[in-house]
Image: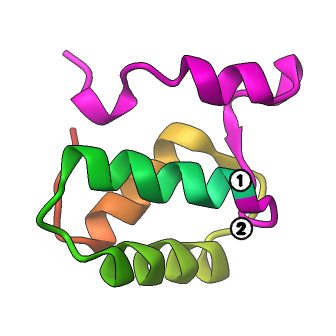
Amino acid sequence: MPHEIFEDWDDYENLKKKDDIDFFSCSTKWEVKYLKEKIKQHYPTIPAKDIANAIDHCCKTASPPYPRKLFVKYVMGQLGVRIN
């Protein structure tokens, strides 16, 4: 069963180009903001600064293009949350 953080990305997908919905863009501010809010929604005890730092770290160390699910797993791993 998929982790709950991967559920209900419809609003994200509606804002993306249809051929690009499976990839995350670190250079697009609204996407970074969306991911921060999505993580905060599911993990309210993680400080917003830690979330921002984890995303920033992953954007700097991963190679684009960033497959969305793998990128989210990478960010969550930086936050100490294991996702299968």
Q: Which mark is on residue 9? A: none
Q: Identify the magenta region.
A: 1-29
Residue at image coords 44%, 84%: 53
Specify which label sits upstream in the sequence, 2 or 1. 1
Q: In terms of image quadrants, where is residue 50?
A: bottom left
Q: Amino acid at mark 1?
A: Trp
Judge the density around disc 1: few (<14), some (14-19), many (≥20) Cα neighbours within 10 Å: few
Question: Closest to the observer: 84 or 41?
Answer: 41
Picture coordinates of residue 81, whole percent (x, y): 17, 59
Q: Which residue is mark 1?
A: 30
Percent across and percent down for residue 24 are 68, 47
Q: Residues within 10 Å of mark 2 (few under 14, many from 20)?
A: few
Q: Position of residue 68 (x, y in %)?
A: 58, 41
Say whether residue 21 is magenta.
yes
Q: Is residue 80 left or right of residue 9?
A: left
Amino acid found under the numbered disc labelled 2: Ser
Which residue shows up at 51% across the image and 24% down it? 9
Residue 71 in view in this figure:
no
Against 49, residue 23 (above or below) is above
Kindly state the secondary structure of the residue where label 2 is placed.
loop
Closer-to-camera residue (69/56): 56
When asked about the image quadrant of residue 23, the answer is top right
Find disc 2 in the rendering and name its residue.
Answer: 63
